[in-house]
Every structure is written in C-alpha cells, then in structure tokens.
Image (spheres, rainbow, N blue to C red):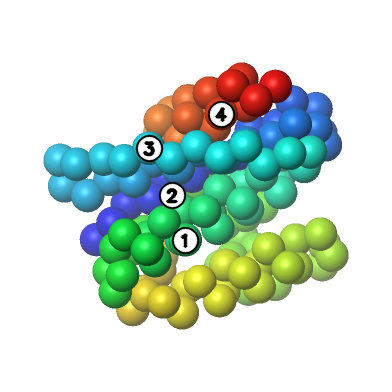
Amino acid sequence: MIEVYTDGAASGNPGPSAAGVYIKLGNNHWEHRFYLGDLSNHEAEFWAVIHGLEICKRDFPGEIISIRSDSRVVVDTIEKEFTKNVKYLPLLSKIQELKQSFPYVFIKWIPEKHNKNADRIARAALKENH
C-alpha cells in the first residue's frame, strides 16, 4: 500500500498557494512540490490530493493508495462524494476520475502534527515562488 501525505498552503485566502505531496512505500519516500497560483487554502488542499493521485497513477499504477490529509473539508468531501461549493465540484470530479485508476483508494484525516513532511514541502514550494 502506498501512503500519500498531502497538504496545501496559501499566503492569504485566496492568495499565492502551493501543494506538497510526500509519498511513502516501505523505507522509501518521495517528495513533490507544486506551485499553484492564487487559490484558497482549501482549493490548494484539493490540488495536493489531485497531484498525489496523478503521481501514483504514473509511478505506482494498480497499487492500493492511502491518502492522508489534515483537511477535514477535503476528506469529508471525498468520502461523501458531494459538495455544495461550486469551486470544489470540478476538483472532486477530477479526484473521482483519478480514483478509477486504482483498485482501492482510501482517504484518512490525520492531525497536522502527523502531516509535517507534506506541510514542509508545500511551504517550501510557496516560499520558492512567492
């Protein structure tokens, strides 16, 4: 099972934003950072999940994926497969589409203190580009 830790960061809400993805498989790990432009913090959190799934689709096709996020909005939206927020609808659709590439995709809320690597990566990407 691939563990995918995701986090978004924004300077202002909305404002310059970035996503961090920390992927762990056994004793190996990979770090990916993405500058996203002007978005809300929640939108950056969704994009972090999207980028995480895209990386796994490319690098770990057919694997079981466990996404870990400290965003309750993102986790609840993906679990319920529903949102009233029109800004999140296309992001949810993209996530649902990407999930089809894997036999199982789990999403789990984790406290911020357990998501330090993804947070560090997202903040680094924001700092590099802001």
Q: Position of residue 34 (x, y in %)?
A: 56, 40
Measure how far apart labels 2 and 3 are at the Cα level: 14 Å
The outermost residue toward the left is: 27
The residue nearer to you, when weighing 31 against 9, is: 31
Residue at the image point whose x is 43% and y is 40% from the top: 32
Position of residue 78 measured from the top left corner of the image (x, y, whole percent)? 59, 65
Label ID, residue 68: 2
Q: Earlier in the sequence, mark 3 or mark 1?
A: 3
**10 Å crowding of disc 2: few (<14), some (14-19), many (20+):** many
Q: CA distance from mark 3 to mark 1?
A: 14 Å
Q: Quadrant of the N terminus?
A: bottom left
Q: What's under tag 4, amino acid-wise?
A: Ala
Q: Secondary structure at mark 4?
A: helix
How many residues crowd mark 1 within 10 Å: few (<14), some (14–19), many (20+)? some
* Numbered mark located on residue 54 in the image: 1
| Mark-to-mark CA distance, 4 and 3 | 11 Å
Chain-order first, disc 1 or disc 4: 1
Q: Amino acid at mark 3?
A: Glu
Q: Which residue is mark 3?
A: 31
Q: Quadrant of the C terminus?
A: top right
Residue 125 numbered mark, or none:
4
**In this rendering, would 15 be left or right of 128?**
right
Give the mark count: 4
Residue type, label 2: Arg
Where disc 2 sits, the SS reads strand
Give the amino acid type for the residue marked by disc 1 in the picture.
Glu
- Sequence-earlier tag: 2 or 3: 3
